[in-house]
Amino acid sequence: MKRHVLIYGLIGGILISVLKWTEYRFLVIEHSFEIYGGLIAATFAVLGIWLGLKLTGTRQRVIVKQVSVVKGVSVPASETFVPDERKREDLGITRREFEILELIAQGLSNREIAGKLYVSENTVKTHSSRVFDKLGAKRRTQAVQLGKEFGLLP
């Protein structure tokens, strides 16, 4: 009985080896071009993903600490800043437009401002363009700079 099991196992092992060898021959020898093409494609896909992540990595933010200068003596900007309400009214900037200008100065996008104020993104765009017109600015950065020069922003 042991002899029959041993012979049956040996024949089964030989048959499995022959089948695996023919499978190997079929895959590697007859389809080598497709296998090599697939390996090259996978290599370039991994390389492309890695390069894309490197090029579009997270941007570094630069934080600038503002310091007010009073007659040659530097005073930290930690003192409370009071915006020039008279200048805001002279320019015709509404409170909502001023609020949006402050959020622009904080570096928020239109979508982030809309989410924070619970308004639509188009409303933010409208208020932003009105503030730009009233300040005489063409871009967000220019509007923030003019807001600082007019004493509206810290």
Image (cartoon, helix red, strand yellow):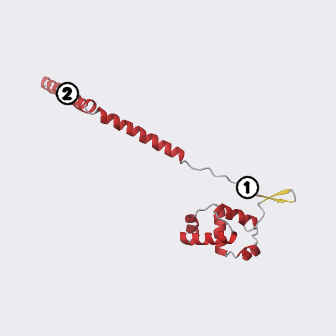
Q: Can residue 154 be seen at all in this image of the molecule?
A: no
The percent position of residue 95, horizontal first and vertical second, equals 67, 75
The residue to which callout 2 is attached is 18
The residue to which callout 1 is attached is 65
The amino acid at mark 2 is Val
In space, the residues marked 1 and 2 are separated at their CA atoms by 75 Å
Determine whether the residue tagged by mark 1 lies in a helix, strand or loop.
loop
Mark 2, Cα crowd under 10 Å, few <14 / some 14-19 / many 20+, is few
Above or below: residue 118 compared with residue 38: below
Residue nearest the viewer, comparing 103 with 10: 103
Mark 1 vs mark 2, foreground winner is 1
Q: Which mark is residue 41?
A: none
The percent position of residue 41, horizontal first and vertical second, equals 38, 39
Quadrant showing the N terminus: top left
Quadrant of residue 68 in the image?
bottom right
Image side of residue 132 versus residue 90, left or right = left
Quadrant of residue 124 in the image?
bottom right
Labels 1 and 2: the sequence-earlier one: 2
Which residue is rendered at x = 49% and y = 45% of the image? Answer: 52
Which residue is rendered at x = 72% and y = 65% of the image? Answer: 146
Above or below: residue 51 compared with residue 29: below
Determine whether the residue tagged by mark 2 lies in a helix, strand or loop.
helix
Above or below: residue 14 compared with residue 55: above
Image side of residue 45 versus residue 28, left or right = right
